[in-house]
Each structure stands twice: as structure tokens, then as C-alpha cells.
Image: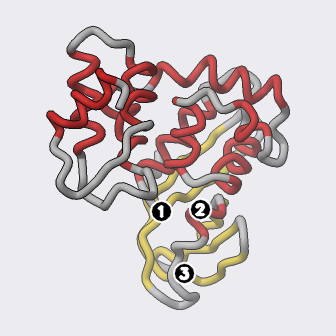
Amino acid sequence: MITFLEGTLEEKQPGRAVVNVGGVGYEVLVPLCSFDRLPPEGAKTRILIYHHITEVSQALFGFATAEERRMFTLLLSVSGVGPKIAVSALSGLSARELKTALIESDVKRLSSISGIGKKTAERIIVELRDKFSAGEALETLAGADDQPIGDSRLRDAALALISLGYKQDDARKMVKALKLETSTSVEELIRMALTGR
């Protein structure tokens, strides 16, 4: 199995790239989230690969990050979801947005992606939402726009609430509703979540 390609980017078009590796051109199908990160044509590149093999064909799917490739393989594990829908999902949402939609059971957001109807979105959520660890689920909190990069206070507060016996979803909702200020400590966040202030 091919796990990555490293070479010169010969061609790139939305959804497709050709990588020259030692004089051999490999056609790679890429979702838009990965396509946006490709270097200009003629530059050196390294693309992570998912080698999809069926009885009748083979295709290489390329990704800029391991997280994008992981989301793609998770989507393929859902019954009725093939590579075309998986690429469409990662073209409509970033890997992080997709993970957030799955963890939050956001059927509306998933079904807004081209090629994914309401029933497919519901099936994807049912089959994948439990594939993420508690830590990963809580990391979606760290993606909040008002939380500075590298700030883990909300996640730490939610983990503390879980250790106190709250369900993961409840802890996440309690913490997400809090107003985060620079001087607020994790202990204060926990107190605020428990008192509802």
C-alpha cells in the first residue's frame, strides 16, 4: 500500500493533482481542504495517501494532514459511504469542522454538504460519533473562535466536570456557555459551570 508520495507537483486542479515521483506521474484525487494547501506547480511536495482498491479499479486519494486522511477513512467505514461522498464531505468542511459536526450530532451541517442527504448524515453521525475519545471531543472546545490558540482552560474545566460525574455532552455544553477572560483560572471556570454563572 502507498502511504505517501514525495516529489514534484506537476499539475493541480481542484479535486486532482499529479505528482512526479522519480519520473512516474501519479494521479491523486484530493478534497478541497487539502487542495488549498498544495504548493504551486513545479514545487516539491509530500502528500499523504489513502490507496483505495476495489475489484474493478484503484485510486489514490491525497491529504495534506494525517487528520484529514483519518477522517476520510472513518467516513469510508460507514455503510453506504464511498470515496466520492467522503471527498465531498472533506471538500465541504475542514477535518476539524467535520469532527465537530459529528461530535455535536449536527445533522443540519452535515446534510448541507453536496451529496449528503439527511438520512446519510444521520447514519454517519450514529456510526462515527463514538469513534472519538473524550479528549478529542473536548478538543472541539479549543477550536472556539474566542479562545486563544494553545489555551486549554475550557478543555481542562470540562475534563474536571466529567471526573465529577457529569456526562461528556453535558460537561461540554456547560463549559461552552462560559465567558472566558484572560484572568479566569480553571478552578473559577469549574465553579462558574457548577453554579450556572
Of mark 2 and mark 3, the one earlier in the sequence is 3
Name the mark on residue 21. Answer: none
Instruction: Quote the CA–CA distance across marks 1 and 3.
Output: 13 Å
Kindly identify the residue that appears in the image at 83 percent across and 48 percent down.
Answer: 114
| 109 vs 6: above or below | above
Q: How far apart are marks 2 and 1 (CA)?
A: 8 Å
- Proximity of marks 2 and 1: CB atoms separated by less than 8 Å: yes
Question: Which residue is disc 3 drawn over?
Answer: 9
Which x, y percent locates residue 120?
78, 27
Pick the quarter of the image with the C terminus: top left
Find residue 163 and report its horizontal and vertical position in percent: 21, 15
Label 3, secondary structure: give it. strand
> In the image shown, does 188 or 157 lie closer to the viewer?
188
Q: Residue at x 54, y 81 (%)?
A: 9
Local packing at callout 1 (Cα closer than 10 Å; few below 14, some 14-19, many 20+) is many
User: Which comes sooner in the sequence, label 1 or label 3?
Assistant: 3
> What's under tag 2, amino acid-wise?
Cys
Instruction: Report helix, strand or loop for mark 1.
Output: loop
The residue indicated by pointer 1 is 64
Residue lying at 22% horizontally and 12% vertically, measured from the top left: 164
Q: In this view, does 68 lie to the left or right of 174?
A: right
